[in-house]
Image: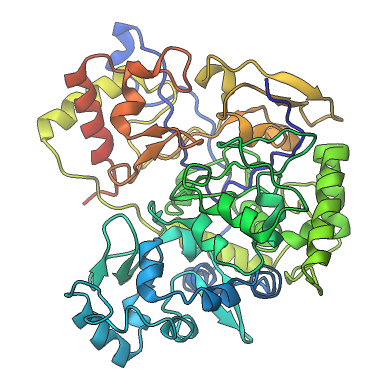
Amino acid sequence: MRKPLALSMVFGVAGVCAAIFACEVLNPADQAKRDGPENPKLPNPIKVGNKERGRDVFRFETFGTEGFWTDAVRLPQGMAHHRVTMLAALRNGVNFDSDALPDDVRTKIEREAKTDFSKAHAPMLNDPNLMPRLVRSNAVIGLVERHGKTGVTCALCHTITDGSVLTLGSKGSIGRRIDGRTPHGMMIGKLLALADNSRALYPTLQLDMGGKVIGRVQKYHLSRHSSEAQVDAYLSDPEAYPPGTFDDSPDGNGNSIHVTPLFRMDLAAPFGSSGQNDVLDDFSNAVYTLLFDQTDLLSPGGRKFIHALGGKAGDKMLADYAYVLNATHVKGYPFVVANGGFKPGTPATPAGKRVNSELLFDLNAYVVSLQAPPGHAESALAVARGRDLFRSRCTSCHNVDPMKPVNASLIPLTKVFPNYKPVVIAMRKPPLDPIQNSPGTFDDKMVVVDASAGGGKRGNALPMLLDLARKPVFLKDDSVKGLDALLNPKRGAKAPHPFYIHNASQRGDVMAFLRSLGTPR
């Protein structure tokens, strides 16, 4: 049993759709009747503002956190020092908005896209001096320039393109924006490793506390004394930081999880894989105030929040973080522009701060309006057979119709993970559950943070069953490769989500049904 001495908090930019939960077989008399769970808990109403303004928030708003990415992490400086080219960025999964390319650049890129990408045949794709210009023109999706500094927005991890100019398969692409969808091949860890001061990401690294670590690859024991090269080695390791994942929890644990799509958010609740946010804009506020500016953890409210969650372990992590920032000459933090004076530790204001609420409501309106792609067209007969099997085996948790809101009730870990046998590490004041950990990686994101802070129970939020034809991995620890593996009994009776289709032909039908789900054509 690994003894967790680090925090494990989730801000679920990546957790809403990280797993597919199937359920027990129904009695034959009920098979034809149930299209979803009985008496489902409905999501809370979402307060929405202006959708058009929300699009700008999604694509371009930083709330001042460009200071964190430029003055603390020093991402643009690192990209310049590494002489990052457009081609290198594409190979790391970065996407480019063709409509925002300067006219002279677009003409040349369209021509070079038809070549072998060599320096001789594609000089612009291989020109490291081009990237700053593309950032300034908002052509690098998710990177924006404000007041001479570069920040990160939602779009970096929640937008792809149609690939109409160029696509590198599962990697990056150049084309018109398609907001809301996950870029599954983006090497986010490698992008972060390009920064000149990736040590400033300290709370989201795999830290050594008391000789123990939590994460996928146990060889990484990072500390406040770790060098930039050691941090970059961890971030660049695809086994430790897999493609399409982002460590969305400043907890000292190496637990990056697969990025969730951000379309039709009116169908998904609660938000975060631990289900800690019942309100969509609370989730977004936590992203801006704690993830996009991790130095806000060192504000008075941030310190109170982490102490309440992690006690002495949390205090030590923040003391070490302050040491790292001082050692790397980071000053003037926190950078996020937000209203203070709120109670720390609440779902609405975990660090006691909130960015402009009207803009958060505008963002709500936009991500509610974004549509999932149409389902993948397959054999109509196979889809129909798969729907019948799904109805008979999976609808105590899931809806047959993916356009209905998911059941907002949390699924207890004991139901979805038979081998969940946590050991209590520390008790906490109610309503917080104890800090506890189980073998394996499936529960690592919830060792400390769960829905108990808001009066809920420890468990997993259900996902939307949409855009599954593109999704390469399943379960929130990214441990299952593909739908067939998810539904195949070879994984074993004690594995997470051990609900299987034993017959290979029937399994194929259920897969066809799941891949067919999407926005109606």
Looking at the image, what colour scheme do you see?
rainbow
Rendering coords of residue 299 (x, y %): 85, 60
Residue located 67% across and 70% down the image: 65
The residue that appears at 30% across and 54% down in the rendered structure is 170
Tell me which corner region of the image, top left, top right, bottom left or bottom right, holds residue 186: bottom left
Residue 233, given in percent of the width and then of the height, sits at 57, 53
Could you tell whether 375 is left or right of 194 in the image? left
Viewer-proximal residue, 294 or 392?
A: 294
Occupied quadrant, residue 435: top right
Q: Nearer the viewer, residue 240 or 261?
A: 240
Task: Confirm whether residue 169 shows in the render.
Answer: yes
The residue closer to the viewer here, 168 or 435, is: 168
Q: Is residue 465 left or right of residue 290?
A: left
Quarter of the rendering occupied by the N terminus = top right
Residue 204: where, in percent of width, then height? 66, 50
Tell me if 154 is positioned left or right of 74 in this view.
left
Residue 494, placed above or below residue 63: above
Residue 281: in sight, yes or no?
no
User: Quick one: 274 or 362, which is closer to the camera?
Assistant: 274
Rendered view: 238 above or below 359: above
Q: How many marks?
A: 0
In the rendered view, tell whether residue 242 sits above or below residue 485.
below
Q: Quadrant of residue 207?
A: top right
Residue 2 falls left or right of residue 246 = right
Give the image location of residue 469, x and y in percent. 27, 43
